[in-house]
Image (spheres, rainbow, N blue to C red):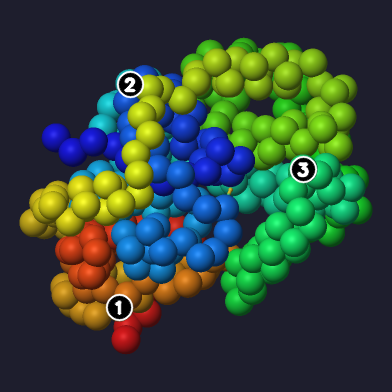
Amino acid sequence: MNELILHHYPQSPFAEKARLMLGLKGLSWHSVLIPPVMPKPDLLALTGGYRRTPVLQIGADIYCDTALIAQRLEREKSVPALFPEGQEAVAAALAQFGDQLLFQHAVAINFQPHALEARFSELPEQVMQGFLADRKALFSGGSASRIETEVALAQWPVLMSRLETQLERNGEFLLGEEPSIADLAWYHPLWFVASNAAVSILLEDYPRIRVWMARIHDFGAGASMEMKAAEAIAIARDATPEDLPEHGFVSSRGLRLDAEVTVSAVDYGCDPVAGRLVHEELDEIVIAREDERAGLVHVHFPRVGYRIDTL
Ligand SMILES: N[C@@H](CCC(=O)N[C@@H](CS)C(=O)NCC(=O)O)C(=O)O
């Protein structure tokens, strides 16, 4: 069986979400550290252009986006469930709210000048300038719009109070007594705020949230072993992508199997990945691409938030 390899960096909120999924499920994995800004030649050898963090690799199969990574890990180990039976829609919808709205608030809060200064205080000025230029490029051309700082600061207490009230009245987790993907997706934006001493005060008035955060933090990150990027690429090169289902190819746009396409995120980090369309189903798109270093790989994307274009 091919092992799980997570390409990530420590400070990334979405990577924290993925690490917690691995922790909750008690999985072992290999950790490949990637740069937080472009260029990322080793990651792109695997993804073909997708640059966001994190990415899950299993042999020659590359999974982009934590929404799809969650589904893949659920297949790997179904219990504890990220999408509890009978609550699939509510879990996924809450996760989307955390990943988008709460995350955008956390970004606005962390990008205030004093918050950036605190985050980069130990580093030379040009590192921060490089980071800002990188994030400007990341958000150009996509549909995501930034929330203004004043708006984010005004709305934050409303969002936090709602969570505080629910946690007081209804169990230990968002859906009740058991954790789900919803908790992890709400946790990572709060973790992003909590990890910066210049803004962490924004969580101080919410004791139940802090207990809930400690509970989620305790899931840990599973057992990880460091791996060099070159080794991960060699693993992809030596592996064969997993068999795809023979049936169930449902193209949203009437495309034929093996059509030459690009797949890109619609919101931000919209760099297109070119390849051959080898599978499409309700909530997954898979393209095959040949890479000089990684060989034949299958790159998987979720349906929601991604577009397919023909070449
Ligand atoms: N929808 C994506 C969003 C991922 C995302 O926004 N990741 C951030 C880091 S937390 C990112 O890619 N930043 C730019 C980078 O790492 O290059 C997912 O769920 O994985």
Q: Is residue 59 visible?
A: yes
**Which amino acid type is marked by label 3?**
Glu
Residue 79, numbered label? 2
Position of residue 125 in the picture relative to residue 76 (left or right): right
**Which amino acid type is marked by label 1?**
Val
Q: Are marks 2 and 1 in contact (CB under 8 Å)?
A: no
The secondary element bearing badge 3 is classed as loop
> In x, y percent, where is residue 273?
37, 71
The residue positioned farthest toward the left in the image shown = 246
Relative to 29, does residue 236 appear above or below in the rendering? below
- Nearer the observer: mark 3 or 1; the answer is 3
Which residue is disc 1 drawn over? Answer: 261
Q: Residue at x 41, y 23 (%)?
A: 222
| Distance from the alpha carbon under mark 2 to that under mark 1 | 36 Å
> In x, y percent, where is residue 263?
38, 71
Q: Residue at x 65, y 21 (%)?
A: 213
Which residue is disc 3 drawn over? Answer: 122
Q: Can residue 263 be seen in this view?
A: no
